[in-house]
Image (cartoon, rainbow, N blue to C red):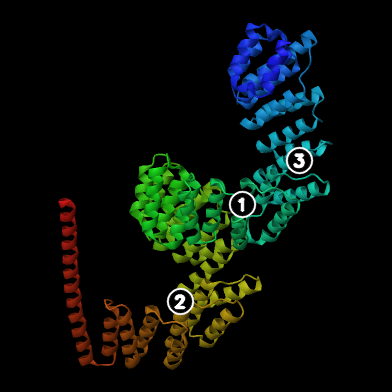
Amino acid sequence: MMHDHLAALLLRGGGGQLRAVHGAAVKLGCLASTYLCNNLLLSYRSRGLLSDARSLFDEMPRRNVVSWSVLISASSRLSALAEALSLFAEMLRRGIRESCDRPNSFAVCALVAGCARVKDAVTGEQMHDFAVKLGVDEDESVAGALVDMYAKCGRVGSSWRVLALTSQRNVMSWTSMIACLINHGGSGYRDTAIVLFKKMLILKVCPTNATFSCIMKVFDVPELLPGGKQVHGCLVKMGTEMDPALGTALMAMYGRCGGMDEIAKLACRISHDAFSKTALLVAYARNRCNMEAVGVFQDMLVENMPIDHSTITSLLQVCSSLGQLRPIKEVHCYALKNLFKLDTLLLNAIITVYGRCGDIVSAETAFDIYEIKDTISWTALLTCYVQNGLSQEALFFFREMVQKGLGSSVYCVTSALRACSSIANFSCGWQIHSRVVKLGIDDDNSVENALVTMYAKCGAVRSALKIFNSISNKGIISWNALITSFSQHGNELAAIQLFDMMQEEAVCPDDYTFVGLLSSCSRMGLVAEGCEYFEQMKVMYDLEPKMEHYTCMVDLFARAGRFYDAMRFIDAMPCQPDQLVWEALLASCRVHANVELGRLAAKKILEIRPEDPSPYIILSSIYASIDMWDEKAQNRTVFNFRQVRKDMGSNQRDALEFSDGIFDALQVGAT
């Protein structure tokens, strides 16, 4: 029969002449064949021609459950969920009125999938009720679609209940539940996701590539690298084919966990696409493999792979870690030239890297140009001001954020408090503290630490101690802030006692802790105790001393008048002493009127910074204190002569730079 021939033509791949077949069916009167019409509907659905499918459906003289299901599925797949629901409701009415076939599991599954696609949990729950009434909720495909729908809508409990009550679970159900636990559950749910994955293996449910890609998201810190390796070994043992999507998930996992050796091996074994290359670049950038990340970017350019916003953001991170401003500007220009539009995440990254490299003007320009800015954009520029010592500007900017209703996040508040700490602005800090209490974020650990630091830097030790005592989970930042506060404001004994409390509570000190501790010992003249703490730092806590610690030790010996020990300590330093070390020695020479050592310290400072006038001033003070007036006068003459030469050299240099600038301008004008 003719309708069978036309249907066979469609099945053999004659869909390219879909409308021609449809037209022939109309002319030959073959639309009476429900079988042919259903095949035409399927062809229209596969090509996304919903209006044509609906027209054919309306022309059909006889429809069966397949006809309704195909059109409902087509409408749902093409995001016409309202039309799909309307068709479903009409099918139910006709089924009751005309005793026709009721909706089957295919139609219900299609509608549930449509709800998942648009994340409509309310309609999804209604479809769940219909599935129960129709008796298809136990169907494997329907149960899997329900688990997936609740998962994509973030309904962890509902998704779990469906999975638990379903006797027939397919791999889609397991994968959807694992994805729901990872994407929408808290950190505690991730352990449950691993348990679920293990149960799949025990029940011999073979994970798909999507399952493996999903479970890889659990492993996101270096401590979980062994678990990630075990899952990788599992998929290799099961003979799972490594497609680019799974390779991308594996490289992202190893990047988060710091498995750079595994990434290098994996990158050579998989076929790459733009997503896998981007994942490789992100992994290198995250682990500070800067040159490797740049090499991946160059490969992407050579291979004409599409560059997206995440690639540019990671590349900016690489440039920021290198501390070079020029590459940042080049990447910024490339993004402006090649990306259709910069999204907010990329804008925030641009502002952040300019701030880290100290280019405040470029950060402000990037912020002002783009109209679409979120709270993170404002916070990024606020942080930029604080990082570069523009604390007053940061506070004005924070006030503007508050006026716009944007200054309520924890990050904004902590940045503003850091600005108050830098300039010891107690009044402003107290006002921000009041705002913190009104916002109800005063129990946030980072805010509490910022408040302790702010009050400590402003000299309000009692307020700092009060907040410190109220913190339930005291971190090293809180302890350091209070130790430094006590040390700087004359409570050196309290600082040492606080360090003893730290040890009793098993809080491990860091470099900054010992700076405050050694400073306290220096001010109190506790030479033996200071030497003991310095030794503990290296032996007990495996902390390598920095220049700040060496400076504190030199200050400790010199304040006590033990200049021989100070010089012996300087000679034994594993690195060259910087200006601060010699300044600490020179200051104590002034107190103890040690002329010879004072001259040596002043000479060393001038070798490092010839333009610094402070050595001359302190040396003159030492001469005056012991009535060496001729030496003082000579020292003053040398200082004045050097100042004149410095000013002349500065003027000549400025004139030379100006002439070079004029020359360049003329050259540009000539071309």
* Closer to the camera in the image, 405 or 460: 405
Quarter residue 141 falls in: top right
- Mark 2 surroundings: few (<14), some (14-19) or many (≥20) residues within 10 A: some
Q: Is residue 79 left or right of residue 353?
A: right
| Residue 65 higher or lower than 326, as above or below | above
Vertical position of residue 91 compared to residue 589: above or below: above
What SS does tag 3 mark? Answer: helix
Mark before the other along the chain sequence, 1 or 2: 1
Q: Residue at x 29, y 79 (%)?
A: 614
Q: Which mark is residue 548?
A: 2
Visible in this render: residue 408? Answer: no
> Would residue 180 be found to the left or right of residue 536 on screen?
right
How far apart marks 3 and 1 lie (CA) works out to: 25 Å
Question: Distance between the Cα atoms at labels 2 and 3?
Answer: 59 Å
Q: Is residue 495 left or right of residue 641?
A: right
Q: Which residue is mark 1?
A: 270
